[in-house]
Image: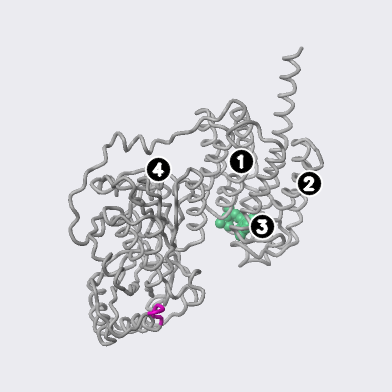
């Protein structure tokens, strides 16, 4: 149970403010998270970690000499947005490239990958190793699908130690991947957790029971039993991990770092009782125990539970493990005093600079702003209706989610246009603000769509109709890549795909952008209406599928309403431009 908060929506932000206020000797705040407040040598690879908030000390608590250079910190249990990851990485970069590492969750992968692409386009070399230590989350032959839990620490530490020792980006990546190959975890939970302001726990474990393999965001476990004794739990954890020893490791005589991690509200004393038996069992198996850890390294808000991680050392990993670390939550060995970054230069590197677009792109940016305003107004006009149809099979938040997203987008686009941004920057800012603030599946997807269209617009010159249609097509592909829904699954894909193909088709046939857009919007409207007959196969609505037959998909409907309204805005803008030309001639 979480007891203290102000405005629940501000919780993560205020938590970061307080964390930074208390740890200024290690970290400073940047848009999207924190970076070190100490000087790193020029050319040192920057290790950037991150994920949702609610897992302290992961991720901000692990920033400091010997470990991470920066942490992108999302909302509670929500991935940081692409823009947040990008901003943190930019601020953390020392000219030696950026090494990303984080738990392997879909939202994180999407946003970190998109940020990585953007950094590469800026000429900053990037590599990524996602942590996949949780052996419950997928079979051993599908290790790439496993999620990351407390094993984050070993991979981050090896990367941080390698970077501190002067390894280049390729070498840091190799070592981190190697560390991940040799890290395995297994966890149990006794309670769920309750986010600030929530009336109910996000997930629950029945009283007196223990969930085996429950994820750190409540992903279902594999089994449930009565709560064992402390020794019984130690036995279970050790057995599971010794049943899956990394390739090339002989158990007898192997050196392991055991990490017994508390998930948020398990007492240290309880963990020590469990660890006592774990140590005995590992020694009985003839393992050599190195630097055991018992404590909280990756929590799950106030969940009561624990996980055991075994990190199987070899020569090179053992040597890196000895490197000193000094961070807000984690210290090992002794780190020499560090020089602090100069606050004024630090501020300059994180200032939110908007590169101005050229004259004609700035004029396109004004049309983009008008279109974003149209989106927000359209959503406002239909907010109740969208909520109502989402409530039939979903959770009823589609209207308010779209409202939060589109209004954040409008504010961001307005700021960008006022700062002289070109069309691409204006729409990209709007897209990021949308996915940042909207929440829900549709928020992330609208971020993907608008970012793709933004790339089609550019910051120089006037894009032609083909470039815009190509941007929409890229957005459509992005949505199916990310959300994995196909046409017929009863999602917004059902409206987006016909919209995109009709637009491309009409533009290729020589129609003006306005005419092509209107034709495509009609196709989207017909397709959205037709989703009423379908059974949902994706998203939240899937579980209550039958209820929704006879009602169209809310995401498809909002998309059709939006593209229709944008068609009107384009027509009005074209008319205004023509009148202006005529006036100039006459
Ligand atoms: P949430 O489902 O997270 O509450 P919203 O209510 O804002 O988010 O949006 C719901 C809409 O999201 C659905 O009507 C559907 O159109 C869309 N959606 C859900 N899952 C997917 C997916 N995998 N791919 C594409 N669209 C999806
Ligand atoms: Mg919803």
Q: Which mark is residue 223?
A: none
Q: Is residue 176 left or right of residue 64?
A: right
Q: Residue at x 27, y 45 (%)?
A: 39
Q: Quadrant of the C terminus?
A: top right
Q: Please, which residue is most extreme toward the right here?
A: 509
Q: Is mark 3 within 8 Å of ligand 1?
A: yes
The reply to whether residue 396 is visible in this rendering is no
Q: Earlier in the sequence, mark 1 or mark 2?
A: 1
Badge 4 local density, few (<14 within 10 Å), some, or many (20+)? some
- Reading the image, the residue beneath label 3 is 491
Magenta region's main secondary structure? Answer: loop
Residue 114: horizontal and vertical position, in percent? 52, 51
Q: Would you identify the image quadrant in which residue 548 lies?
A: bottom right
Q: Earlier in the sequence, mark 4 or mark 3?
A: 4
The residue closer to the viewer here, 279 or 228, is 279
Q: Earlier in the sequence, mark 1 or mark 4?
A: 4
Magenta region: 244-248
Q: Is mark 4 within 8 Å of ligand 1?
A: no
Cα–Cα gap, marks 2 and 3: 23 Å
- The stretch drawn in magenta includes residue 355: no
- Of badges 4 and 2, nearer the viewer stands 2
Q: Earlier in the sequence, mark 1 or mark 3?
A: 1
Q: Secondary structure at mark 2?
A: helix
Cα–Cα gap, marks 1 and 2: 31 Å
188 vs 487: above or below: below
Q: Earlier in the sequence, mark 4 or mark 2?
A: 4
- Reading the image, the residue beneath label 4 is 31
- Reading the image, the residue beneath label 1 is 380
- Of badges 1 and 2, nearer the viewer stands 2
Q: Residue at x 68, y 61 (%)?
A: 486
């Amino acid at each position: 149970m979480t007891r203290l908060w102000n405005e629940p929506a501000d919780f993560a932000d205020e938590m970061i403010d307080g964390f930074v206020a208390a740890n200024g000797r290690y970290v400073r705040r940047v848009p999207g998270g924190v970076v070190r407040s100490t000087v790193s040598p020029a050319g040192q690879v920057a290790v950037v970690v991150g994920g949702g908030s609610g897992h302290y000390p992961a991720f901000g608590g692990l920033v400091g000499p010997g470990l991470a250079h920066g942490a992108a910190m999302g909302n509670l249990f929500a991935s940081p947005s692409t823009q947040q990851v990008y901003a943190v990485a930019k601020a953390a970069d020392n000219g030696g490239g950026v090494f990303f590492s984080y738990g392997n969750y879909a939202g994180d992968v999407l946003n970190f990958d998109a940020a990585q692409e953007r950094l590469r386009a800026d000429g900053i070399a990037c590599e990524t190793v996602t942590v996949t230590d949780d052996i419950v989350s997928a079979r051993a032959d599908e290790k790439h699908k496993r999620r990351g839990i407390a094993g984050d620490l070993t991979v981050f530490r090896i990367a941080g130690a390698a970077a501190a020792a002067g390894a280049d980006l390729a070498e840091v990546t190799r070592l981190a991947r190697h560390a991940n190959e040799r890290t395995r975890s297994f966890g149990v939970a006794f309670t769920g957790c309750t986010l600030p302001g929530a009336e109910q726990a996000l997930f629950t474990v029945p009283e007196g029971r223990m969930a085996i393999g429950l994820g750190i965001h409540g992903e279902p476990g594999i089994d449930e039993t009565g709560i064992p004794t402390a020794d019984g739990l130690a036995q279970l954890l050790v057995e599971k991990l010794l049943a899956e020893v990394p390739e090339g490791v002989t158990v007898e005589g192997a050196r392991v770092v055991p990490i017994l991690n508390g998930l948020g509200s398990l007492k240290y004393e309880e963990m020590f009782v469990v660890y006592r038996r774990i140590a005995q069992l590992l020694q009985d198996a003839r393992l050599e125990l190195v630097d055991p850890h018992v404590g909280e390294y990756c929590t799950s808000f106030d969940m009561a539970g624990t996980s055991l991680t075994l990190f199987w050392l070899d020569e090179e990993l053992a040597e890196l493990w000895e490197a000193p670390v000094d961070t807000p939550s984690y210290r090992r060995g002794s780190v020499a005093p560090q020089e602090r970054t100069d606050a004024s230069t630090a501020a300059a590197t994180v200032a939110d600079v908007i590169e101005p677009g050229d004259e004609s792109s700035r004029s396109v940016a004004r049309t983009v702003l008008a279109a974003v305003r149209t989106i927000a107004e359209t959503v406002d006009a239909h907010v109740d209706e969208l909520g109502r149809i989402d409530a039939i099979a979903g959770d009823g938040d589609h209207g308010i989610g779209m409202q939060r997203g589109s209004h954040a987008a409008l504010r961001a686009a307005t700021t960008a246009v006022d700062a002289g941004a070109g069309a691409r920057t204006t729409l990209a800012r709007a897209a990021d603000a949308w996915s940042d603030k909207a929440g829900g599946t549709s928020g992330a997807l609208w971020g993907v769509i608008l970012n793709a269209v933004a790339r089609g617009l550019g910051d120089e010159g006037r894009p032609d109709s083909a470039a815009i249609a190509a941007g929409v097509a890229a957005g459509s592909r992005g949505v199916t890549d990310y959300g994995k829904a196909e046409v017929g699954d009863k999602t917004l894909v059902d409206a987006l795909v016909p919209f995109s193909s009709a637009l491309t088709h009409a533009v290729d046939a020589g129609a003006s952008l306005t005419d092509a857009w209107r034709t495509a919007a009609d196709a989207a409207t017909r397709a959205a209406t037709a989703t009423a007959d379908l059974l949902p196969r994706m998203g939240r609505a899937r579980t209550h599928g039958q209820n929704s037959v006879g009602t169209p998909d809310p995401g498809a409907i909002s998309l059709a309403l939006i593209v229709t309204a944008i068609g009107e805005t384009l027509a009005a803008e074209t008319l205004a431009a023509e009148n202006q030309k005529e006036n100039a001639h006459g």
